[in-house]
Image: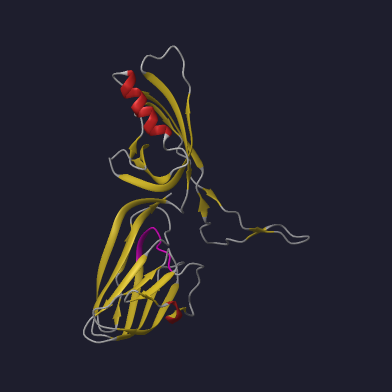
């Protein structure tokens, strides 16, 4: 695996050395007088934060003018926030929000149109984003139990769910994750007309009904044991969707496979 582009700019490919650090966890230790520290995460996977990673490489060109153009495009990245893309050995890609913190160019007389460069990037977000998923589920008139697959190796809560009822007005929608250890139960109470969309964006923590803010109709119900509204575990997730009113319709789960 290697970092290949940042904010649409191709990174030099000659003689690369890339830091491929895994994320660091956010500690949640609780200390009480006279007792050993308690791990606040308990059995849950700890939230992680991105590290600063480095790319050491060599830029080359057929002319000094072309080399200057390449170096200028890289120096322009300093301070920019954008998408850092990592290409895997099978040519698939994963991306991550990042900010370019430095571009170091050390000029020496021993290089003839070859320029060593060190770049550093601060990683943001909870994980690397792999393949994009837009799983469409056909709803029954009452209960639907689809399987939603997160093809990565990391939990993700960056999920947007769009429920579009058909036939008649939907008056309530319950969405569960029944996967062991990931129990969640979201409820929306309110009228959603047939053909309109209820959008619950878990990552952004927003709720919209036909484009209008509708957070007041949203709640987390009993049996909800996670801090986030919904978390998709790596692999298959057992989902349950229960609607009242409406005569079917669809629910779409939009998310990326999550990778450490």
> Residue 194's x, y, as percent?
24, 82
Residue positioned 21% across, 85% down in the render: 167
Left or right, residue 226 beside residue 86: right
The chosen color scheme is: secondary structure
Look at the image and give the residue range highlighted in magenta. 230-237
Front position in the image: 69 or 183: 69
Confirm whether the magenta stretch covers residue 233: yes
Confirm whether the magenta stretch covers residue 165: no
Which residue is most to the top? Answer: 110
Residue 12 vertical placement versus 98 (above, below) = above
> Residue 218's x, y, as percent?
44, 78
Which residue is most to the left? Answer: 167
> Residue 42's x, y, as percent?
58, 62
Residue positioned 25% across, 84% down in the render: 141
Residue 173 vertical placement versus 204 (above, below) = below
Q: Is residue 78 visible?
A: yes
- Residue 252: image quadrant is bottom left
Left or right, residue 122 beside residue 192: right
Count of labels in the image: 0
Which residue is most to the front? Answer: 65
> Residue 28's x, y, as percent?
61, 58
Residue 242 vertical placement versus 93 (above, below) = below
Front position in the image: 164 or 140: 164
- Residue 27: image quadrant is bottom right
Q: Quadrant of the N terminus?
A: top left
Q: Is residue 177 visible?
A: no
Residue positioned 77% across, 61% down in the render: 33
Residue positioned 35% across, 55% down in the render: 257
Q: Main secondary structure of the magenta part?
A: loop
């Amino acid at each position: 695996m290697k970092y290949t582009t940042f904010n649409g700019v191709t990174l030099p490919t000659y003689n690369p050395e890339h830091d491929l650090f895994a994320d660091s966890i956010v500690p949640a230790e609780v200390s009480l007088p006279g007792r050993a520290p308690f791990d606040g995460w308990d059995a849950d996977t700890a939230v992680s934060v991105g590290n600063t990673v480095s790319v050491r490489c060599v830029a080359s060109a057929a002319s000094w003018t072309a080399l200057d153009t390449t170096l200028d495009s890289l120096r322009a990245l300093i301070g920019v926030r954008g998408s850092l893309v990592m290409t895997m050995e099978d040519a698939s890609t994963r991306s991550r929000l990042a900010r370019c913190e430095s571009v170091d160019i050390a000029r020496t007389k021993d290089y003839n149109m070859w320029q060593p460069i060190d770049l550093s990037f601060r990683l943001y977000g909870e994980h690397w984003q792999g393949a994009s998923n837009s799983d469409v589920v056909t709803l029954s008139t009452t209960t639907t139990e689809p399987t939603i697959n997160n093809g990565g190796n990391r939990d993700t809560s960056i999920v947007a769910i769009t429920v579009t009822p058909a036939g008649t007005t939907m008056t309530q929608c319950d969405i569960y994750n029944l996967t062991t250890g990931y129990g969640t139960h979201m409820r929306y109470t309110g009228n959603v007309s047939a053909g309109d969309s209820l959008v619950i964006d878990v990552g952004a923590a927003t709720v919209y009904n036909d484009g209008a803010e509708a957070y007041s109709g949203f709640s987390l119900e009993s049996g909800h044991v996670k801090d986030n509204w919904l978390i998709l575990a790596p692999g298959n997730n057992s989902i349950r969707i229960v609607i009242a009113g409406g005569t079917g319709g669809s629910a779409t789960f939009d998310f990326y496979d999550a990778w450490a």
